[in-house]
Amino acid sequence: MSPDDDSVAGGADRLVGAVADGDDLAVEAALRPRDLGEFIGQTRVREQLDLVLRAARARGGTADHVLLSGSPGLGKTTLSMIIAAEMAAPIRITSGPAIQHAGDLAAILSSLTEGEVLFLDEIHRMSRPAEEMLYMAMEDFRVDVVVGKGPGATAIPLELPPFTLVGATTRAGLLPPPLRDRFGFTGHMEFYEPAELELVVHRSAGLLDVEITAEGAAEIASRSRGTPRIANRLLRRVRDYAQVRADGRVTREIAARALEVYEVDARGLDRLDRAVLRALLELFGGGPVGLSTLAVAVGEERETVEEVAEPFLVREGLLARTPRGRVATPAAWRHLGRTPPEPAAGQPGLFGT
């Protein structure tokens, strides 16, 4: 089990989960921007990437290898497709977990055409033998295919056409330095600001033929956890509510009522997030409490709490990880409508409050 995605212990079915399922992937294909001009957000990465691609086209060669890092749902796959489109090149899509042997990678590399873009998702989960083969392929456009076993094994050099590797990772720290160093351009995808997500929601609403007000888009954006994929998913659920229980038009009131039905609150927290905070406050007085104990209290696996719920709660400043255990911040008390306790005499409160 990998902690890299919301599939950990039941997190894949969350409405606010950032990992796409089959339905999401089908819808995303229709909503994806086709070029850098249509791509919303990630201004710095977009500008830098535009320079890299323009320069490559001017030289008449292939673009440098590109590494994109960041949380799921921020547009790494979309950017890889845009790179291929901007270079007028075909794209081959695979993932690190699918490449368990060097032979798997050799088969893919040997079938690439000149200038083709190879998108390798979750590149940090590739096997070590394949990773070592990739070093030579990226640098020298050559791989050594080993034929036979034992003392009689023979390495046959195989020349590769120039290609562009686009690697995507949610955990850049797990990539070994020799692999990172072979990428000519590295871009880190940041979480989106609410104003950027409003633009994403308006664009998607237009493509889905959904009538939406500016206030309705703002309401959805504010609950989307800084992630376009979540914004698009919430938009579709709000659209369903508006069609069934209203006149089909998405306003702030309709969006708020719809997301209340789906248990996504004003800050984007869902049932699991609130269950963790409530257990921390009501059963343990705000903490500190150990992760395993907290997981038992909410009836979830330890990995689910740690990898699915905690990252967003920490990023929102609602929960803190300390050497003694998990602690609710004053913001968590206020978010659940409770008054933070006064620190005991001689004991400063969390973060000095």
Image: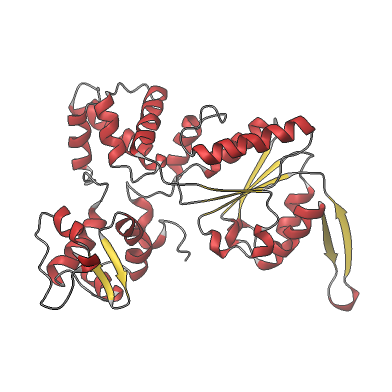
As drawn, 37 above or below 281: above
Front-most of residues 11 and 73 = 73
149 displayed left or right of 45: right
Q: Residue at x 88, y 65 (%)?
A: 155
265 displayed left or right of 138: left
Q: Residue at x 58, y 62 (%)?
A: 125
As drawn, 272 above or below 225: below
Front-most of residues 163 and 260 = 163
Q: Position of residue 309 (x, y in %)?
A: 32, 59
Residue 261: image quadrant is top left
Residue 298 visible, this orientation? no
Residue 215: image quadrant is top left
Q: Position of residue 40 (x, y in %)?
A: 46, 33
278 displayed left or right of 152: left
Q: Position of residue 57 (x, y in %)?
A: 73, 31
Residue 286: image quadrant is bottom left
As drawn, 124 above or below 92: below
Q: How is the image coloured?
A: secondary structure
Q: Residue at x 35, y 66 (%)?
A: 306
Q: In this figure, what is the number of numbered marks? A: 0
Front-most of residues 122 and 46 = 46
Quadrant for the C terminus, please: bottom left
Q: Residue at x 12, y 63 (%)?
A: 340
Residue 296 visible, this orientation? yes
Q: Position of residue 97 (x, y in %)?
A: 58, 59
